Amino acid sequence: MAIKSVTKVRKRISFAILSFVSFLWIIPLIWGLATSLKTDNDIAMNPTSLIPKTFTLESYRDLFTKIDTPVMRWMFNSFIIAVSHTLLYLIVASLAAYAFSVLKWKNKERLFWLVLSTTMIPAVINLVPLITMMIDFNWFGSWLSLIIPGLGGVFGMFLLRQFFLGIPSELIDSGKIDGLGAFGIFTRIVLPLAKSAFLVTGLFAFLGSWNDYLWPLIVMSSENVTMQTLPVGLSKIASTYNYDYGLSMAAAILSIIPVVIVYAFTQDKIIEGVSRTGIK
């Protein structure tokens, strides 16, 4: 009984700490939403208030009516780029993970750890070589420069590999007995069992592409506003209307809505996928 009571106390303490930390994390989001719904006078008089005195949608109205802030176009650009990048990334990462987990070949483990060690290299070191490659490929200023680079990211491959390693070898052997080749085992056995892992990997890839700011800022032309992605567009709003906090917050809130919707419908699968890949 004493052990059970101690366990209950620990759970309650853990729950209280996690609730407090979650509250601290959500305060900026609540403040941003409240600011986007305030009038200019209310923002000036009560900048830290989490409840607007007068609710207004004027900031959102201005966001969609200003000619130099095509937010919906920016969201469309970011969505197309993020979805395209995610689909291609899943193909590349899953094939690499399959090769490093199920297939048997010489020096597989050594090469895997060599590839994994590249995660210790800061991404900023690759900027100059990547820019040179984009210019040589004539991709500078096009969406290809935002979709193709990054397809060799190691994290997604590692996540899928950990999941593939948990697939019973008996299933793989039964596929071989039935006459399936390496690609047949991959498409008919491995992929159907890895839906949750694919969902987690795809979500991380989508969020990385959706929120990317530095690379699109470098490779996309600043003159062609309609080709920009949402993070770059939001920075332009913040710099152009640096005193219009309501407009800036409205743009920020609008940018996270798609991510929140995706997560709300997939959170169960995400938790399942993370737990089953051994990443706690």
Image: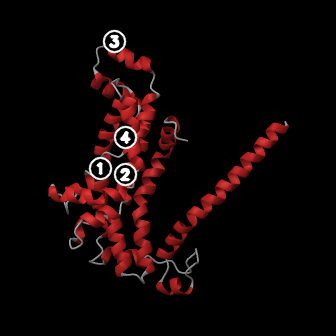
Q: Amino acid at mark 4?
A: Val
The residue indicated by pointer 4 is 115
Query: Height in image: 276 above or below 30?
Result: above
Q: Amino acid at mark 2?
A: Phe
Q: Amino acid at mark 1?
A: His
Crowding near the residue tagged with mark 4, few <14, some 14–19, many ≥20 C-alpha atoms within 10 Å: some
Q: Secondary structure at mark 4?
A: helix
Q: Nearer the viewer, mark 4 or mark 2?
A: 4
* Marks 1,2: beta carbons within 8 A: yes
Q: Nearer the viewer, mark 4 or mark 3?
A: 4
* Marks 2,3: beta carbons within 8 A: no
Image quadrant in which you'd find residue 181: top left
The residue indicated by pointer 2 is 206
Identify the residue shown where x is 57% and y is 83%: 46
x and y percentages locating residue 257 in the rendered image = 42, 60
Q: Which of the two labelled residues, at mark 1 and mark 3, occupies the earlier sequence position? A: 1
The residue indicated by pointer 1 is 85
